[in-house]
Image (cartoon, rainbow, N blue to C red):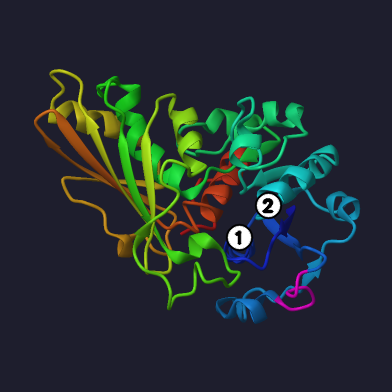
Amino acid sequence: MLKTTIIGASGYTGAELALMVHKHSKLTLTGLYVSANSLDAGKTISELHGRLTGLVSHQVEALTDVDAVASACDVVFLATAHEVSHDLAPIFLEHGCQVFDLSGAFRVQQEGFYSEFYGFEHQHETWLDQAEYGLAEWNSQGIKHSQLIAVPGCYPTASQLAIKPLLIEGLIDSTQWPVINATSGVTGAGRKASMTNSFCEVSLQPYGVFSHRHQPEIATHLDTDVIFTPHLGNFKRGILATITMKLAQGVTQQQVENAFIHAYQGKPAVRLLNQALPRLQNVENTPFCDIGWKVQGKHIIVVSAIDNLLKGASSQAMQCLNIHYGFPELTALV
């Protein structure tokens, strides 16, 4: 059994991970931790998340001695802020732990990226260079062999899964950037209350126009520029991404379908709907990405839907763990 610890356990993704570890036959939950000044310390995870009552009763503890925690576990999930993961990941790695980081701290290997988009200078270039991007369907070999997996963001996951098959097959006219319009549920803003995510204040609106940090993450890993506009929706969970692209000269509907089938055949977390278009209610509380598309003339609209807390965060992290250790990909997820 792999001794598994979750840091940042009181948040939405931390709670989802706790349930997955509980359900996983090869993992044992050895610790749930939050920052030393967190008001959640000392409470049980089921007090904080009632859906875990009768399932996971572990107490959430303050993280005060990182070295002691690291020496007592095999696997750690970091469901923490970017700066916190940046500081914690190297400590766990130096203790030999397998690290799955759900923050953005190790996702992009590009000079100046973190100072420009995250507001801090990256101090761990060696680990950054060794990190593997955890887009499960597209980087299984890297995930299998790396000690540090940087789990993608929720918007980048929904966007890349929809775009990559067409780019890889050369079916997109590269002179016209893919245009991504994506809407996320309020849980994407985290559990801490604020006027931004207060349900009484939320109204469908765009944000981060031309400035959202997920745009360069998407562009870097696709190796092509994109126009990305995120929106905050007045619903709890899920992401729906609608992506408009221009097809290369002479590309047919059949070529498009073949590209998606070739990319995702045997990939159990992606469901191809072809001519049907995804709906959020069909992916809520599931580890799946649903993808559908329509072709008209020289253009294609691809729609993808995920649960932002699951395929956009915790279930993708667990999917990466399953790939890394050679377990069936959807173990503990369905």
112 is within the stretch colored magenta = no
Residue at 83% across, 61% down: 63
Quadrant of the image occupied by residue 300: top left
Where disc 1 sits, the SS reads: helix
Which of the two discs, 2 and 1, labels the residue nearer the N terminus?
1
**Residue 216's spot in the image, x, y percent?**
49, 34
Quadrant of the image occupied by residue 132: top right
Q: Are the residues flagged by discs 2 and 1 in contact, CB closer than 8 Å? A: yes
Q: Is residue 65 above or below residue 134?
A: below
At label 1, the amino acid type is Leu
Whether residue 205 is visible here, answered yes or no, is: yes
As drawn, the label of residue 77 is 2
Q: Nearer the viewer, residue 261 or 174?
A: 174
Q: Nearer the viewer, residue 18 or 160?
A: 160
**Residue 292's spot in the image, x, y percent?**
24, 45
**Residue 43's spot in the image, x, y percent?**
74, 78
In-image side of 36 versus 15 (left or right): right
Q: Nearer the viewer, residue 71 or 106?
A: 106
The residue carrying mark 1 is 17
Q: Is residue 286 above or below residue 59?
A: above
In-image side of 314 versus 122 (left or right): left
At label 2, the amino acid type is Phe
Point out the stretch of residues depicted in magenta.
Answer: 38-44
Q: Is residue 135 above or below residue 112?
A: below
**Residue 213's spot in the image, x, y percent?**
52, 42
Can you name the residue that lies furthest to the left here?
A: 297
Where disc 2 sits, the SS reads: strand
43 is within the stretch colored magenta = yes
Whether residue 263 is visible here, answered yes or no, is: no
